[in-house]
Image (cartoon, rainbow, N blue to C red):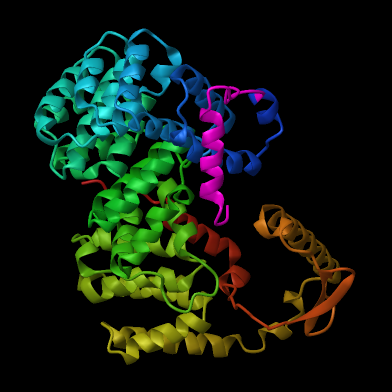
Amino acid sequence: MDDDYSALLEALATILNATDAPLIDLHIEEALAELEGPHFFLVQQVLCELIPLLNVDQNVLLPFVARLLDAGGNDLAAGAPSTAFGEWTKKDLARPFKVYEAARAGDSLALRQLFTVLLMNTSVEEGLIFAQANDREAKLAAISALGAMELGERYDEVLDTLLQGASSDDEDTVLRSVEAGYRAAAKRKVYAPASFDEQLERILQTRSPSAIHLEADLLWRYRKGLTENAIDLCLYTVADVDPGNTGTISHIDRASYQLVRDGRAEQVIRLLSELIDRSKGRITLDAFQGTYRALTQVGADVLGSAVVYWLLNGDVYTRKCVANEVCSVGNDDPPFSIPASSLPTDPSDQLFLCRKAVGWFFIDPLAAVVIPLAVLRDGSPDIASDVLSLIYDPLLLSYGGKLKDYLERYVGDGGANGSGITELLARKAAFKDAMEGIERLVELHPSEMQREAERVQWNEKMERGMEQGRRKSIFEDIFTKQYILYGCSSLTPIHTGEGATHLTEIKMKSFSISSELPLLNIVDPVGLDHMLVHFKLEPREQR
C-alpha cells in the first residue's frame, strides 16, 4: 500500500469490469481457505476499497459480499464488506432500488444488506414502506435504518411509524422500534416523545434478557434522547441483569461511566450496589472498572460518598467488593475523602458506619480511619468517645507506622477533636513502651518445627502465586524469560541479521513497597477476629 496503491485498485477494477473478465468470486472458496486471521482482514481491506469501483451485476456482488461477511465472523472489522456494498449502491441511482426490489421478492442476500443500503442512501421513503410491510426481516432492518438516518422534515412522520411498531405484539419489533425512536431523538439532541416512555415501561415488565440489554444500550448510546423518567426506568431494570450475560454487563459499565461523567454519580452508586447484591456477589466491581475509574477521577469526595453509601446500605456482597477495591498495601494517603453531606444524620448510623469501616477496611488502616475521623469532624459530638475508642482499639493498637504519622499530621493540621487523638497517640506510645522486651520471653517463641513448617508453606504459596501470575500475564508470550541470581544488570543478545549479534545491557533498579502486620493479630488473633467479624456482620438498626 504505497504510492501506487490507488493505481493498483484502478487497474484491478478495469480488469474486473471488462466484458470478458471472470466473475469476482472465481475460486473464492479455495482463496478464503488459504487466508487465516490477520491475513484475511488485510485482503478484505483491499477488496472493500475495490468493491465501490466495480461495475458488475448485483447478483454476482451480493454472494461475494456474503462470503466475506461469513468468513469475517464476529470480528469488529467483519462488517466492512457491507459498508463497501453500500458505497457501491451510491455510485448509481438505480442500484439501491434494484436491491429493494430483490428484498421485496424475498432474496435473502438482498435482505441481509437492506439496512446498510437504506441507511447509506438515506432512503426514508423506502424505509417507511419496508417498516410497514409484513415481511418481518425487512421490517426490522428498515426500523433500525430509520433510527440511524438523518430524517430532516420527516422526523415526526418516522416517529409515528416507529411508535406503531412499538405497539406490536412481536417482541423483536417492539424492542427495535423503541431503540430506533430513542436513537432518532438522540441524533437530533431532543427527548423522545412521552409515548415512547410508555412503551418502554410496558416492555420492561417482561424483564427479558433482550429488554435488559436494550436498556443498557439506551443508557450508553442514546442517553441524549432519554427523558428523566426513561433514565430512571432503565436504571431500575438493568439491575436485574443475569450475571452470565457478560456482554450486557459490559454495556452497563460503559453507560455507568458516561453517567458518572455527566454528574449522575448518585444514581450509578445505587445501581452498582443493587447489581452486586441482587446477584449475590456473582457480579463484582471487577466488571465495572471503567465506572470505578470514573468515580475516582471526578474527585475523592465522590468516591468517598460512594463508600459511605455502600457500607451503610449495601449487603455483605457489596461491602466485600468495596473493601477489595479501596484497600491496598503500601498506601501513603487514604484513597478517598468523606464530605459532610454524605454522612447519615442519626448518631447511631454514624457509629454503625464507623464500625463497618473498621471491620471491612482493617487491613488498610489509612482507609479504615478516614470515616471515623470524618464523623469526629462533622458528626454528632455525643458519639465522639465511642469513635475515639474505635480508632484506638483495634486500629492504633494494631498499627504504628503510616497510621501514626497520618494521625500526627491530622492533629498538626488542626483536625477536629485533636486533643482526643493526641491522647490516643500518648496511650499508644505507653503501650509500645510496655511491650519492650516481650520478644525475649522464650515461652512466646515458636518451636523450630513450627518455624520450618511455616517456611515451607510460605515458599509453596509464593511459588503458586508466581506461577499463576505468569500464566495470566500478557508479557509471558512477548518477552524472553530470564532468571538473574546476582548482579545489577542483564545482557540480552540482539540478532541484527547476517549472523551478526550485539549485546544490550539493561541496568536494574531497586523498588520496594512496605506493609505492616497488625500487632493484635499476633497478640490476640482470636479476639481480633471475633471483633472484626462482629463489625462486618452486625445488622443496621431498623426504624
Point out the residue furthest to the front here: 19
Can residue 146 be seen? yes
| Depicted 17 relative to depicted 40: above or below | above
Q: Position of residue 346 (x, y in %)?
A: 20, 60
Task: Residue at 19%, 22% (x, y): give it.
Answer: 125
Write the residue at 26% across / 16% down: 130
Residue 24 included in the magenta stretch of the image: yes
Residue depicted at x 44% and y 51%: 285
Determine the residue positioned at 47% across, 79% down: 332
Q: Image quadrant of residue 193?
A: top left
For this orientation, the residue located farthest to the right is 499
Left or right of residue 288, residue 168 in this image = left
Estimate the x, y position of residue 442 in percent, counting from the top left. Answer: 77, 80
Question: Would you say residue 206 is visible in this rendering?
Answer: no
The location of residue 324, given as percent across then percent down, is: 49, 58
* Along the line of sight, the residue nearer the viewer: 410 or 64: 64
Which of 266 and 430 lies nearest the eye of the viewer? Answer: 266
Q: Is residue 509 left or right of residue 346?
A: right
Which segment is the magenta one? 1-27
Q: Is residue 445 left or right of residue 194?
A: right
- Is residue 99 placed above or below 346 in the rendered structure? above
Where is residue 506 drawn, in percent x and y?
74, 80
Q: Is residue 471 left or right of residue 338?
A: right
Q: Does residue 426 sit above or below 539 in this rendering?
A: below
Quick check: 184 above or below 158? below
